[in-house]
Amino acid sequence: MKESITTKLDKLLEIVEILASTGDPRRIAIFLSNKHPEDVARVLERLPKDLRVQVFRHLPIEIQADSIIYVNEDVLEEMIKDLSNRDISELVTEMDADDATDFLAELDEEERERVLSLVDEDERREYEEMLQYEETSAGGLMTKEFLVFPGDTPVSEVLDAIKRSDVDVVQVFVVDEEDRFLGVVALRDLLDADPQRPIRDLVKEIPTVPFDMDQEDVIRVFEKYDLLFVPVVDHENRLLGIITVDDILDVLEEETSEDIARLAGLGEIQSLILPPWNAAKNRLPWLLANLLTAFIASAVVGAFKNTIDSFAYLAVFMPIIAGMGGNGGIQSLALTVRALSLGMISKRDATRIIVKEFLTGLLVGMVVGAITGLVAWFWVGKPLFGLIVFFALTLNMIVACVVGFIIPNIIAFFGGDPALASGVIVTTFTDVTGYFVFLGLATLLLKQLL
C-alpha cells in the first residue's frame, strides 16, 4: 500500500518529537539533513519558535537554502528576525538566482541593502537587476541559470562549454550578434551534429514571453504550447532569462490557492498552523465587511417586521430563500472567476453568457421553487403561500446566476481582482433580493394569507 504524503509527514513529526525530547537540536538537524527540502520546511513550521531556529542553524547550508524557500510566509518572517545579515547573505549565495531574488524580496529595503552588501559584487548586480521586475511578472519569475551562445558558435565549442558548466542542460539558447533571441538547440541534436557546424543551423524556434507579461498569462502560454520552459525577452527580443515549468507549477498552485482564499473572504492564502492571534487578524477584515452587508439584509427584513409578526411561517422559510440564492450565486461566481483567470471570456461572450445564466437561473429556480413551494403548501396548508415561495425562489435564483457572472466581470473591467470582493457582493445581492421579494409578496397578499 502506497504511503500518502500526510502519513509520511506524520511519521517525520513523530520522530522529530521523540528527538526533541532529548533537548538536542543537532540530533533533529542530522535526522532532517537527508530529507527533501519541502518536508524539512513542513517540520520546521511545526516546531516551537526557539527550537525551530536552533534546528535550522545546525542544518547544512545547502539544506537551509533549499528548505527555507518552502517555509510558510508568516513563519519565514519570524525566522528572518532571528538570523543575522551574515547568515542571510550566506543563504542567498547558496540559493538559485530566482529563489534568492524571491527571498530578498521578502526583506524590507534597508535589511535587503545590508544583505546585498555582503554578497559577491557580480551576484549583487544580478539580484538588483532581477529585483527591478514586478514580482508577479515574467521577469520576476525568470532565472538566468542557462547556457546561451551566439549563432555562429561551432557545435564542438558548445559541447566543451556544456562539459565545463555546472548547469543542468537539456537545451542551449541561441542569440544573434545583438543578443536577439533566435531559438533553442536540443542537447541530442548537438551530439548528432557535425562538430564544426554553427549552432545557428540547428536552431528551432519556440514561443517567447515579454518580461512584463503577467504571471497568469505566462501560465496560459505554457498550457497552450505544452512547454517545459519559455524564454523571457525584452521589447527588442533580446534574451533576458528563462522560466521553467517547476516555477510555473509553483505559480499555478499560488494562483489557485489565492483564488480559493479570496472567494472565502481571506484576501490571501494562510496557513492553518498560524497562531490564533495571527489567524484572527487575517480573517477579521472580510468578516467585518460581511457583517456590514448582513446589516443591510437585516434592514430589509426589519422593514417587514409587522408582516412577519402577522404570519410567523415567513420566518421559517426566509433562510431557505436567501440560502438557496446564495448557493446559486456562488456556483455562478466560481465558474466565472475560473473562466476569467484562464482568459476564456471575451467581450463578445458577455451578452450570450448573461442570457444563458438567466435561463439557467430560471430553470434551476423553477425546479427548486416548485419543490419548496409544495413543501410550504402542505406544511402551512395554504396554496397561496406555496406560490409566494415558488416565485421568490425562482426570481432569487435568476438574480443569483446573473449577478454571479456580472459582478466579477465588472471588478475585472476596472482592474481589480474578481475573486477578492465578489463573494460578499453576490451574497448581499441574493440576500436582499430574496428577502425583499419574499416578504414584499407576502405583504401585498397578507390578507389572503391570514
Image (cartoon, rainbow, N blue to C red):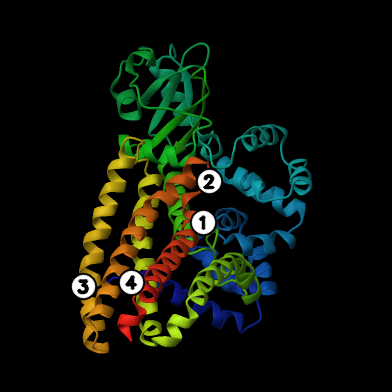
Disc 2 from disc 4: Cα separation: 42 Å
Q: Nearer the viewer, mark 2 or mark 4?
A: 2
| Residue 269 % position (x, y) | 52, 61
Q: Which residue is mark 2?
A: 416
N-terminal of the pair, mark 3 or mark 1, is: 3
Q: Position of residue 124 (x, y in %)?
A: 70, 36
Label 1 to label 4: alpha-carbon separation: 39 Å
> Alpha-carbon neighbours of circle 2 within 10 Å: few (<14), some, or many (≥20)?
few
Q: Earlier in the sequence, mark 1 or mark 2?
A: 2
**Which mark, by number, is residue 3?**
4
Q: Is residue 346 left or right of residue 101?
A: left
Q: Earlier in the sequence, mark 2 or mark 4?
A: 4
Number of other residues with Cα within 10 Å of mark 4, as a class: few under 14, some 14 to 19, many 20 or more: few
Identify the mark nearer the N-term, 2 or 3: 3
CA separation in Å, label 3 and label 4:
48 Å
Residue named by callout 3: 370
Distance Cα–Cα, label 3 vs label 1: 32 Å
Q: Are marks 1 and 2 in contact (CB under 8 Å)?
A: yes
Q: Where is mark 1, residue-wise?
A: 421
> 129 or 419, which lies in front?
419
Q: Nearer the viewer, residue 351 or 161?
A: 351
Q: Pointers 3 and 4 in contact (CB under 8 A)?
A: no
Q: Quick check: marks 3 and 1 in contact, CB under 8 Å?
A: no
Residue drawn 39% across and 55% down? 403
Mark 3 or mark 4, whichever is nearer to me: 3
Q: Which mark is residue 235?
A: none
Sequence-earlier tag: 3 or 4: 4
